[in-house]
Image (cartoon, grey):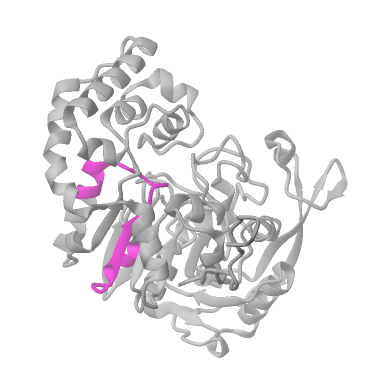
Amino acid sequence: MSDSGSQEAPKTRIPRPTVGNKVTVVLGAQWGDEGKGKVVDLLAQDADMVCRCQGGNNAGHTVVVDSVEYDFHLLPSGIINPKVTAFIGNGVVIHLPGLFEEAEKNERKGKNWEKRLIISDRALHVNAVFSFLCVSFPPLLALLSLGTTKKGIGPVYSAKAARSGLRICDLLADFTQFSERYKALAKQYQSMYPTLKIDIDGELLKLKDYVEQIKPMVRDGVHYMYEALHGPPKKILVEGANAALLDIDFGTYPFVTSSNCTVGGVCTGLGMPPQNVGEVYGVVKAYTTRVGIGAFPSEQKNEIGELLQTRGKEVGVTTGRKRRCGWLDLVLIKYAHMINGFTALALTKLDILDVFTKIKVGIGYKVDNQTIPHFPANQEVLERVEVQYETLPGWDSDTSAARSFEELPENAQKYVRFIEEHVGVPVKWIGVGKSRESMIQLF
């Protein structure tokens, strides 16, 4: 102690905390359905942990391994690797019947998952109240005609913002208190929509059955993630759902999803700091697709769009709806890069363009005959956009057997380089087919 009685300052400062392990992030750069699952499947082969940070079973990833096709909606698709631990973070909304049904389907194809799945206790539960609202109640569907997947995802995120949602930790704590909150929530919606019918007691019985099944999988998500980041060296992969143009803040609002599917959602959806974000890979389809309604500047409502739809088998994994198709729009991709800071791109489904002798690529926008340097926020403005295209020569030959960049036709190589130059991000992978082997790695 000094003469004045005050405590002396320590002679050494506490060192700055170590960053710990970095996570690798895979995100969609368009309106979803870009083939994120294939990129995750590749990276998951030597990963220790694969995470979902947002969305719910409104997402859909298809992965083909050893000629077996797997469909994922809620489980991280990287769980195919038997050595991987899968983590569903607090930003995800979980529909328990859907989770167990999906797991059972994939188990029948030979993939065991139960002991390798961890669920954050802070994740919201998509209960039957929200499912009934979206599937069985036409008046609400009329209000929500925004390209919804009818999975109850929008209503449960709305309840989260209104602080009336029910979380996994609530389900596993005191079931009597949970039941009271569930009944209050159901009655609230029934008072708003008097013709809405819900078997409250029946649904609570079903939920009680899930308690014992799910309990071994649930952890304090923040603590679990911190231990993963600051424990022994570990390869951690984050699998984004949906895509940049469906982000609740940055997408083509209001025709968007209800979560942040850009890079910020990784931090808020897993409970981790931005300093632990490492590589950010943007997945880009070699053309553009969109499910549902909303502005789509490069859409081709003609034989070109039909050919892309047919050749690409463009039908939604989750909805079963045909996807709208159009040329690649690099204005969109650059916008997604501004938000996400992609360190590399994965260009998928290049083989779908094999039959075209000429290929157009959107490189700029005009509105009212004036070039604009940005992606418009307003839907009405976006509907009026005139896309400025550059026409590139096609290759009119089969690329599906190519296993290296050099094996691609010269014009296909030029197409890839054109994208790199305009976006300012290197292409690391090129997809020329459905299987794992058809992903060409450039570096």
Where in the figure is residue 6, as x and y percent of width and height?
61, 55
The residue sitting at the bottom extreme is 406
What count of labels does the image hold? Answer: 0
Where in the figure is residue 397, as x and y percent of width and height?
54, 79
Q: Kindly identify the residue that appears in the image at 32 percent across and 56 percent down.
A: 72
Q: Nearer the viewer, residue 98 or 175?
A: 175
Q: Is residue 425 left or right of residue 203?
A: right
Where in the figure is residue 374, as x and y percent of width and height?
77, 51
Of the 4 image quadrants, the one containing the C terminus is: bottom right
The correct choice, above or below, for 204 with respect to 122 in the image is above
Q: Nearer the viewer, residue 428 or 347?
A: 428
Q: Is residue 85 magenta?
A: yes
Residue 314 found in image quarter: bottom left
Does any portion of residue 38 appear in the rendered image? no
Where in the figure is residue 246, as x and y percent of width and height?
55, 46
Magenta extent: 77-100
Q: Kindly identify the residue that appears in the image at 32 percent across and 69 percent down.
A: 64
The correct choice, above or below, for 24 with respect to 310 in the image is below
Q: Is residue 5 left or right of residue 90?
A: right
Does any portion of residue 371 appear in the rendered image? yes
Q: Is residue 341 left or right of residue 14?
A: right
Of the 4 image quadrants, the one containing the N terminus is: bottom right
Residue 5 found in image quarter: bottom right
The correct choice, above or below, for 186 with respect to 205 in the image is above
Q: Kindly identify the residue that appears in the image at 16 percent across and 41 percent down.
A: 211
Q: Is residue 131 left or right of residue 108?
A: right
Q: Kindly identify the residue that appears in the image at 53 percent across and 89 percent down.
A: 407
